[in-house]
Amino acid sequence: MTSRYKITIAYDGTRFAGFQSQPKQRTVQSVLEQALNKMSKFDEYITIFGSGRTDSGVHALGQVAHFDFPHDMPADAMLRGLNSMLPLDIEIVDCQIVPQTFHARYEAHAKRYMYRVSRSWFIDPFKRFYTGHYKYPLDIERIKQAMGDVVGTHDFSSFVASGSQTKSHVRTIYEATVREDQANNEVIFEFCGNGFLYNQVRIMVATLLEIGNKRRPVHDFLRLYEVKDRNQARETAPASGLYLKEVYYGQQVQQLEKKGHLQN
């Protein structure tokens, strides 16, 4: 009997060319599928469907995917079996058997991303693959003010990288926060929204850092929404600091939508 499994995946994106399979590239999807098909010993190839892509060098704490497996296996046994076959830069952190109607991508209606910025003067060799880097002065209060302009429904055309094939650039951000991690000398951004465009979070972070450095007005996001010009947003923060933290389904999304409306 075929069962559908929903897995939550954590991975270090440093040595991956992103999540989605690509010819002659090491990707999260291809490594997972290799392990899964080795386990199944089934003639028909088993494909994994992710909640969405992450780019080369981007990490995940809570990526979600699903697949159909041709043998009856308890979820905890599937978790243990897959983890025993995966390399050390991937871990299955949760596994559930779900209805056949569940789809990791089409039923994912919100995501949360985290971005870590190292504040050291020189690039820390132990953080270079896991943070962005910004050595210049930052006024965190200015960034917090600007974050208020990020929350809500906006046209993010100024914050999408070239190569995006998405027709609409309108997205809703339910939450946008920034905090200082003084113990680790980092600034931590988080964004939760109903969807994100290609490189959107990395471009927004770069813009917020410029606001914190007083290179832009506090409310420059409002102008950028209007001009719809990617060139005016300028920089893109490195992939190394970006983490897909959580993917939301079902009632979780309704709670976020309600919270987002309250913030507006």
Image: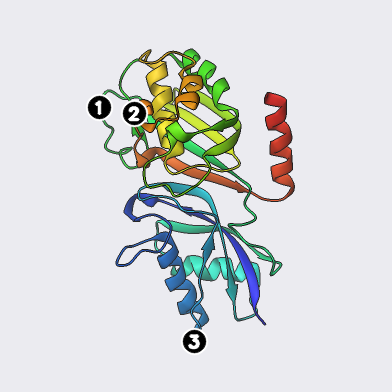
> Who's the residue at 48% across and 58% down the image?
91
User: Which residue is drawn at the image coordinates 72% and 26% (left, top)?
Assistant: 262
Query: In the rendered view, would you say 73 is above or below 133?
Result: below
Foreground mark, 1 or 2, reads 2
Q: Is residue 199 or residue 60 the one in the foreground?
A: 199
Q: Secondary structure at mark 2?
A: loop
Give, as a three-letter code, the residue at label 3. Asp
Tell us which disc is closer to us: 3 or 1.
3
| Dot 3 alpha-carbon crowd within 10 angstroms: few under 14, some 14 to 19, many 20 or more | few
Spot occupied by residue 118 in the image (x, y as percentages of width and height): 36, 29
The tag earlier along the polypeptide, 3 or 1, is 3
The residue indicated by pointer 1 is 122
Give coordinates of residue 88: x percent, y percent: 40, 59
| Residue at 32%, 54% in the rendered image | 15
Measure how far apart labels 1 and 2 are at the Cα level: 23 Å
**Residue 4, can we see it?**
yes
- Give the structural element (helix, strand or loop) at label 3: loop
| Residue 235 image offset from top left, x and y in percent | 33, 30
Q: Is residue 26 left or right of residue 83?
A: left
Residue 83 coordinates in the image, percent (x, y): 49, 65
Q: Which residue is mark 3?
A: 43
Q: For this rendering, which residue is in front, 258 or 94?
A: 258
Q: For the residue carrying disc 2, how many other residues have a C-alpha within 10 Å: few (<14), some (14-19), or many (20+)? A: few
Q: In the picture, which quadrant includes the C terminus? A: top right
| Kind of residue sitting beneath label 1 | Phe
Q: Nearer the viewer, residue 61 or 261?
A: 261
Task: For the residues labelled 3 and 1, say whether their Cβ atoms are less than 8 Å apart.
Answer: no
Residue 234: assigned label: 2
- Most extreme residue toward the bottom is 43
Q: Decide: marks 3, 2 in contact (CB < 8 A)?
A: no
Question: Looking at numbered disc 2 in the image, what kind of residue is underneath it?
Answer: Arg
Q: Earlier in the sequence, mark 3 or mark 2?
A: 3
